[in-house]
């Protein structure tokens, strides 16, 4: 196929399922998660669970679920960030206590290769400078 007639696919093109309610688009999985937790809470209340506690628990589950599914931290999904934190917390807790041995070179290594000489009019007659 001719390169002039083809077009590359945009990199950021993502098709995500969404639900439109009252002119506002919501991500489908967040909507379904919220509706599902509220339905389970309603069923629990109708079966005799404590109303206030059920509201607090279901609200907490919705907030945590939205943070995990839809949240972004430093340009990464919150699942990636949770994985990074989990790996960091599970890494070995070893400290390197041994100090590296450092040997300093002698002063002659720092001396210039060619000794600088004074001009002939600054030399002393009795000195051994050249």
Image: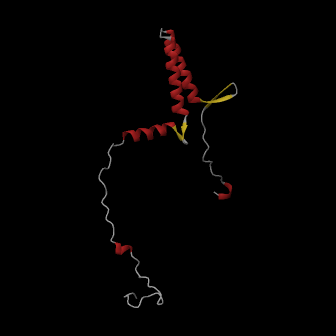
The residue located at (35%, 72%) in the rendering is 107
- Which one is nearer the viewer's eye here, 34 or 18? 34
51 left or right, relative to 109? right
12 left or right, relative to 89? right
The residue located at (30%, 60%) in the rendering is 101
Work out which quarter of the rendered image holds the C terminus and state it: bottom left
Asked where in the image residue 90 lies, by quadrant, the reply is top left
Q: Where 69 falls versus 22 (above or below)?
A: below
- Which one is nearer the viewer's eye here, 92 or 29? 92
Q: Where 6 falls versus 82 (above or below)?
A: below
Residue 75 drawn at (x, y percent): 55, 42
Judging from the image, the colouring scheme is secondary structure
- Which one is nearer the viewer's eye here, 19 or 49? 49
The residue located at (52%, 16%) in the rendering is 55
Can I make out residue 2 in this image?
A: no
Residue 77 drawn at (x, y percent): 52, 39
10 left or right, relative to 121? right
Work out which quarter of the rendered image holds the N terminus and state it: bottom right
The residue located at (53%, 21%) in the rendering is 59
- Which one is nearer the viewer's eye here, 95 or 5? 95
Can I make out residue 102 in this image?
A: yes
In this view, which residue lies farthest toward the right? 23
Residue 45 drawn at (x, y percent): 51, 11
Residue 42 drawn at (x, y percent): 53, 14
Q: Where 107 falls versus 98 (above or below)?
A: below
Q: What is the number of callouts on the image? A: 0
Asked where in the image residue 34 lies, by quadrant, the reply is top right
């Amino acid at each position: 196929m001719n390169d002039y007639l083809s077009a590359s696919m945009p990199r950021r093109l993502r098709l995500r399922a969404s639900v439109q309610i009252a002119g506002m688009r919501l991500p489908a999985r967040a909507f379904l998660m919220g509706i599902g937790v509220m339905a389970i809470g309603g069923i629990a209340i109708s079966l005799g669970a404590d109303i206030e506690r059920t509201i607090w628990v279901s609200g907490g589950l919705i907030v945590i679920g939205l943070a995990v599914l839809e949240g972004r931290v430093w340009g990464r999904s919150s699942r990636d960030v949770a994985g990074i934190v989990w790996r960091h917390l599970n890494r070995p807790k070893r400290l390197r206590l041994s100090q590296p041995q450092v040997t300093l070179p002698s002063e002659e290594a720092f001396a210039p290769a060619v000794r600088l000489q004074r001009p002939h009019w600054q030399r002393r007659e009795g000195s051994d400078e050249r």
